[in-house]
Amino acid sequence: MITLGINAAFHDSAAAIVVDGKLVAAAEEERFTHIKHGKRPVPFTAWELPFHAIEYCLREAGVNLVDVDHVAYSYDPSRFIRERIKGDRFSLPLQPSAHDKGEWENVWDPLFASYIVNAPRQLASGAPHHLKHRFAGARHDGPYKFHFIDHHVAHQASAYLAAPFEHCAVMTLDGRGEEATTTYGRYVGGRYQPIGEVLMPHSLGMLYERITSHLGFLHSSDEYKVMALAAMGKPVHLETFRRLVTVGSEGSYRVETFDPVALFGPARERGGPLEQQHFDLTASLQAILEETVLKLAQWLRQASGETQLAMAGGVALNCVMNATLRDSKIFDEVWVQPAAGDAGTALGAALYVDDEQRGHPPRSWAMSHAYWGPGFSDDEIEQLLKWAKLPYRRLNDVAQDTAELLLQDKIIGWFQGRMEFGPRALGARSILASPLSPAMQQRLNELKDREDFRPVAPVCPIDDLPQWFTPAEANRGEAAFMLFIYDVLPEQAKKIPAVCHADHTARVQTVRRETNPRYYDLLKAFGAKTGVPVLVNTSFNVRGEPMVCTPKDAINAFFSTPLDALVIGNFLVMK
């Protein structure tokens, strides 16, 4: 059975394709269109489907749209509409913003709902001309069956049907879905049991978004910058946030309405100076998030009776919060789906429908890596290099030769294998550098034209984690998706200054040879030459653009930045 999953309602548009319970391909639309997050989460964009990502997934599976058995869209418009539209018609003023919103949350909500209701028709007939052959013959009524899946049901399924657990508690923390913002459940015996949910307007994700905007950053995009700034501040506003965020019984919580200017002073202008007051606000926000989630997790541990936790939702990309939850030992293990944001609901919707339609068979797949995007052969790469008339050479030993370049303090564009699914570069579309010099962080931030405070992350072989970071024993020693922070061991910190954050932590990725042998071998080769089996890993992109997807993207990024070398497949391009 073939199931296509689609996320398109808000942002991080994506597609995934599942065949008999196993993921075959998944990718975000941004990687093909070069528009970060695919689109902005506004009502006017709800009609846009991720046609390029869909086409890629179908191509990777070797099928056309008409060959698919089910299509799963990760938003249920009926739950959003409820009784607010009578019959099959609604009215919209010519200038909606000039009118009262009525019983809707936003004056544009009827249009948003209509766009989503019409997604089956858009899928069948709206593909761009150059992709239409993959969609030929499709109608709004099939031949596949189209399913609208509740947004948080999709988030939940992306966790419990991908996690390496036979049974577990499940928690999703997001900005919002149709109504829910937070959900809890238990996966046991091949079935998911809902335990509770929190509904709008109470949302930890939207609280974080609001402070992100107040600080002059782009909401639904730059929350990770706010998280990074928190390490530089003190939670002086924590008591204020405790009055705004209160936890009740049965996993409930409230977020009161507030005016951030009245509470925290004037909003920072975009690009304006960052001052201690801003650092302190971010630290306070991060503190209330962690404090609240620990209380919710403690309740869920008792309510579910489970010792393992699977998580998804955009808030679950907060690696500092994840580490606090891990270190609390409320659960023995915490696993976070690597595309935890809305992109992952494409995966979750597909897995959910597949599981339901096949009658909940025993699981045969778990998500051990994130390499589900496009890959390119050496023949394809070399053909492009020749066509572009670029000087290059074939490497005899990619790992050894690249390690030698890194030893010379070169910054490397690293393009290998299939692209990552999710927001983190994990050794397929990465920029790699030596961590030995404290100046490397600044060099990389300058190269990527990004803020000075932004940290860069380390990567190491999984068997070397205990010698460099702690707590190495947590989560079975796994940090494959760079979604938890670790403390750098004091005796090792001076050896890897480039990856030590202001609070002496680091967002670590561990690598197994069986999931990425070339990446693993490179780390071991660098370790053999330096005694330090650790590299700096950051995403291979230029400012304002998503990570590179194709060899042409990689070449364009290489020649538009101060990168020193490009290791692409088995080939080396130098400047």
Image: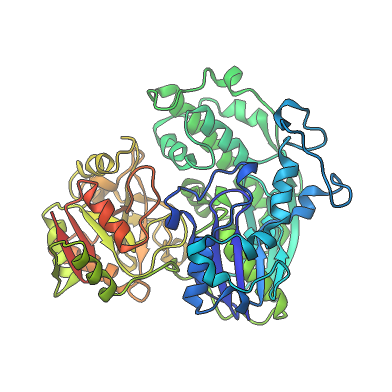
Identify the residue at image location x=45%, y=69%.
372
Q: Find residue 2 and report its horizontal and vertical position in percent.
A: 61, 78
Q: In terms of depth relative to the viewer, which is nearer, 131 or 331? A: 131
For residue 49, above or below residue 44: below
Q: How is the image coloured?
A: rainbow
Image spot of residue 438 (x, y percent):
20, 42
Residue 408 versus residue 54 in the image, above or below: above
User: Which of the pair 565/504 is nearer the observer?
Assistant: 565
Q: Residue at x 56, y 37 (%)?
A: 209
**Figure quadrant of the C terminus:** bottom left
Q: Quadrant of the N terminus?
A: bottom right
Find residue 290 and report its image quarter.
top right
Q: Which residue shows up at 59% across the image and 62% down it? A: 346
Counting from the top left corner in percent of width and height, residue 487 is at: 37, 49
**Total label count?**
0
- Give how far across and how far down residue 317 sits, in percent: 51, 51
Residue nearer the viewer, 49 or 562: 49
Q: Is residue 569 visible?
A: no
Tell me which corner region of the image, top left, top right, bottom left or bottom right, holds residue 94: top right
Spot the residue most to the front: 129
- Would residue 13 be visible to someone looking at this image? yes
